[in-house]
Amino acid sequence: MKDILINVISTQKLSISKQNQTLITSWKFIIINEIDIKLILTKEKSDDKETIEQLINAVKNLNKENINLKNDVLNIKKDVEELKNVLSILSNKILDESSIINNYIELINIKKWIIEKSEKNINKEFKLIYKATKDGDSASKYHELCDNKYPTITLIKTKKNRRFGHYMDQNVIIKQANYIKDEKAFLFSLDKIKKYDIKKPDYAMYYHTSYGPCFGYTTDIHLKDKFLSREDNPERNAKYYTYDVPSDTELTGESNFGVEEVEVYQIIY
């Protein structure tokens, strides 16, 4: 506090007598309140009165700034606590289970993108319902574990270490090959930290029992049966039709890609 007051005095360019300098550097002076200062003021030389009045005003202003700073700190603490609560809910299992999400920031970005589209507050659980390297990469196993469990986040990691994903909001019961409409679906890149909104909601996702995850018309991203053991899973060889993705190989870096891992999380609201 002493250093702060001395700094205030120096920035105010105050002219202070040696006697007042001694007072300022004493701890007793530092902790006295405004009434005590005014009592001292009456005992000081007359030419120092203006100086001490300036000091009082400077301390008042400093106190106001401290109050505002304190409020800001309290608000920040509140935000941090809320964030910690969210992270404790979302991250306990995800960061342990996932070999695709690397850190809290990526998790926060996914949460933020979902809230922007779904207008739902995610304060519950991300439940891992499918992991290709653990459960198998056949289309049948993927559908067995993932069908009719929306909303979901699907994460994909390529053999060249590109990481991206897809959010599906619509909770529908699927029984046959068809496109699924979803106005809130989107693709995203964890590497580029970007979200790609849907342009044609009627083709948000393609369902077929012979395929793994397929997003978009014909499709924009298409994982074939036994996708971990093949190199020809296509990222559409034309500008994306369904999602607002700017280039042919935006997500994977190549027209046909190999898959290292796929994870599907069911969002429990």
Image (cartoon, rainbow, N blue to C red):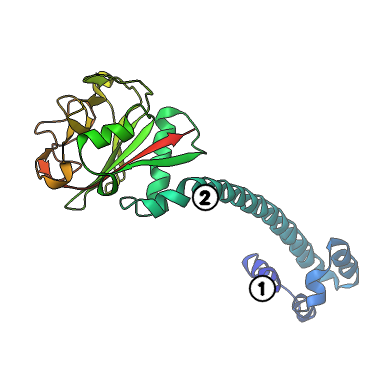
Question: Closer to the camera, 151 or 220?
Answer: 151
Hey, which quadrant is residue 138 in on the image? top left
Residue sitting at x 10%, y 31%: 238
Residue sitting at x 43%, y 41%: 126
- Amino acid tagged 2: Ser
Residue 122 % position (x, y):
49, 36
Q: Are marks 2 and 1 in contact (CB under 8 Å)?
A: no
- Amino acid tagged 1: Asp
Task: Give above or below for 185 relative to 124.
Answer: above
In this image, 152 relative to 248: left or right?
A: right
Residue sitting at x 40%, y 34%: 114
Task: Give above or below for 136 relative to 239.
Answer: below
Task: Give above or below for 163 relative to 236.
Answer: below
Residue 11 % position (x, y):
62, 66
**Does residue 196 appear anywhere in the picture?**
no
Hey, which quadrant is residue 53 in on the image? bottom right
Residue 152 % position (x, y):
36, 34
